[in-house]
Image: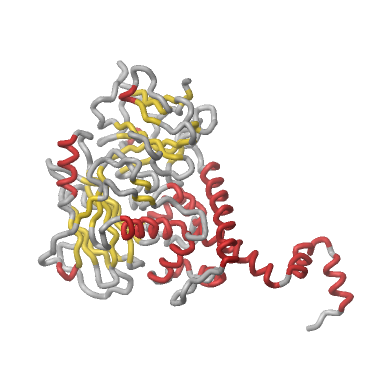
Amino acid sequence: MRLSLALVAALLAAPPLVPAVCAAEDGGDAIAARAVERRAVEAMIWGMPAVNYDLMRQEMLDATDAEPNQVIYWGRPLDWMNQTLTPNPDTLYLMTFFDTHDGPVVIDVPPADDAGSLNGNIVTAWQKPLEDVGLLGVDKGAGVRIAILPPGFDGTVPDGITPVQSDTYGGFALLRANLRSHGPEDVAASVAYGKRVGVYPLSEADDPPETVFVDVQDVLFDSTIRYDSTFFEHLNRVVQEEPWIDRDRAMIDILATLGIIQGEPFKPDAATRSAFDAAAVEAKAYLNDVLERGWGAYFDGTQWRAAAAPALAKAAGEGFMTPDAYPVDLRGTIYTLGFVGIKRLGAGQFYLLALLDKDGAPLDGARTYRLSVPPNVPVEQYWSATVYDRQTHALVRHMDRASRASNAAELARNPDGSIDIFFGPVAPEGRATNWVPTDPLRDFEVMFRLYAPTRALFDKTWTLPDIERVD
């Protein structure tokens, strides 16, 4: 149908249609450009967990000598050279990035014994939890052999091996070898125990080959989120390598607008990359706003909130299969903050996060603060308090120490059993053993971890007070 010139003039003059006027004046190219930027923001929010995974996998491939289906490990407690998101510096990390394109892969978890134990989580390329293993996992420390099955697998799995169906070919396992202390003998014992883990093809399960371990403790391993056009290169790689999951098929056309099409090369021009850069700035601001607004205090009247939003934890625990819930915004936010997924959140570990002090002010690295941890912390293993860079959510660069934990023998305790932890650029006089350094030029955040938490945490008969500024 053709419109008369008079009608066109009337429509263009109408105030409610000012955006249409702009579109008409700018032409179709301007409409398309705005669509690219708008859809790029949504693609970043939706794709955050997959890009988070790919950043780590690419760092494994580019910065180390390791390959998929091998194990990288940090041969000492983590320091700032590990620039993953909110890692735990009071345990030893082992990671395997599995690839099942050639068939199922077995992750062989040893039983806990006097020599050591571990806590581990296995996830897909979208960081959907597949299984928790180790002392606090499905095996409860008895040891287990998990076979990760690729999409469409219709073979059989031998007795004694637990099959776990994945909807992606790739994924990873984060395995934490527990430390009795940071002493060299205990660290060596935890490393030796961690090397009892096995990773091998299911086809060779009867006579497993030796697992390759690569020590990356001296590697700058930086997988912090890149808020620029390179984000979409990582997203494209995941789209090319992994099948579409039914719940996400609505994104196919949206990504096509951005030039990300399965089976086709990704070649954004300069204008598109500029739009991607602008979208990245907006996506970061939006996700940070979601984080700052939070999802309610865990302890009433405090700044502490659960590090994982309850709605997201519920959805992840159900494999994102609930038909009427898909918390993409919360998922995007959490995967700017950390990595991995936990199937049974709270059963093996529970994390609390503080961005603000008792007075509601940001935690300033140039100031000194105190966290008074009450006695009788409800854990069967240990607790820790760790400082992270507020902008990157990684360990603060060039700091000699990132945390203090209850498994540090040198911690000074108060007569009532409480422990004061200090955060600041300089150790308070006489308090160096209980001090975590901060960068005076950067804000920070604190994560309080509880391993093997007990009922008092969940019924809140034990509470954690706010961090207080004391300078």
**Residue shown at 13% from the left, 64% from the top:** 208
Horizontal and vertical percent position of residue 39: 58, 64
Q: Is residue 326 above or below residue 380?
A: below
**Residue shown at 43% from the left, 38% from the top:** 353
Horizontal and vertical percent position of residue 304: 46, 35
Q: Can residue 275 be seen here?
A: yes
Which quarter of the figure has residue 2?
bottom right
Residue that protrudes farthest toward the top in the picture: 415
Horizontal and vertical percent position of residue 375: 32, 24
- Residue 147 left/right relative to 431: left
Of the pair 32 and 345, the residue shown nearer to us: 32
Horizontal and vertical percent position of residue 452: 28, 40
Residue that protrudes farthest toward the bottom in the picture: 1
**Residue shown at 45% from the left, 33% from the top:** 299
- Location of the N terminus by quadrant is bottom right
- Residue 362 left/right relative to 205: right
Q: Is residue 193 above or below residue 96?
A: above
